[in-house]
Image: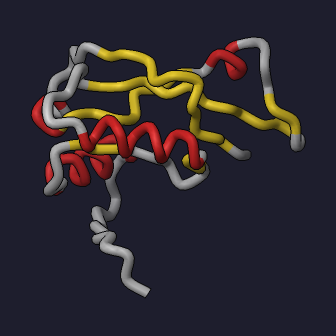
Amino acid sequence: MHLGARVLVLRDSTIAAQRNLGIESAENHWILTVDADERVSPQLRAEVGQIVAGRIPTHAAYRMKFRNHYLGRELHYGPWGRDWHVRLVHARHAATSAVACTNTSSRSTTSEP
């Protein structure tokens, strides 16, 4: 089954180099980065869809709150309970190191061990 994904292979390199290759090869205006152990919730998918459908982006990047789990339970306290990452970036700003970020609402990704 082909869902439109293209797999890029960069051997013997860092995760950052692999991600940068993906960013450089992106053909769309928005880039959503998701690690292999992360899942996008249906709510986040809908919200990202609304953001990327907008003609004029209100922000160059968006941070997402992670819902981290340990031993089957969601973490609410400590550093893993307040875990935010920039994951949605407009391609025009993807290569800059200082990108103005904003939070998405309470939609989140889920990171599973």
Q: x and y percent of residue 51 in the render? A: 32, 35
Q: x and y percent of residue 60 in the render? A: 22, 24
Q: Residue furthest left?
A: 92
Residue at the image position 29 percent from the left and 25 percent from the top = 61
Q: Does residue 94 appear left or right of residue 107 in this picture?
A: left
The mark tally for this picture is 0
Q: x and y percent of residue 98 in the render? A: 22, 14
Relative to 52, residue 1 above or below: below
Relative to 84, residue 43 above or below: below
Q: x and y percent of residue 38 in the render? A: 58, 47
Residue at the image position 39 percent from the left and 40 percent from the top = 48
Relative to the observer, which residue lies in front, 103 or 72? 103
Q: Does residue 31 appear left or right of residue 84 in this picture?
A: left
Scheme of image coloration: secondary structure
Relative to 19, residue 86 above or below: above
Residue at the image position 31 percent from the left and 73 percent from the top = 4
Residue at the image position 87 percent from the left and 43 percent from the top = 72
Q: Does residue 76 appear left or right of residue 59 in this picture?
A: right
Question: Split into 4 quadrants, where in the image is the N terminus?
Answer: bottom left
Relative to the observer, which residue lies in front, 15 or 86? 86
Q: Quadrant of residue 30?
A: top left
Q: Quadrant of residue 33?
A: top left
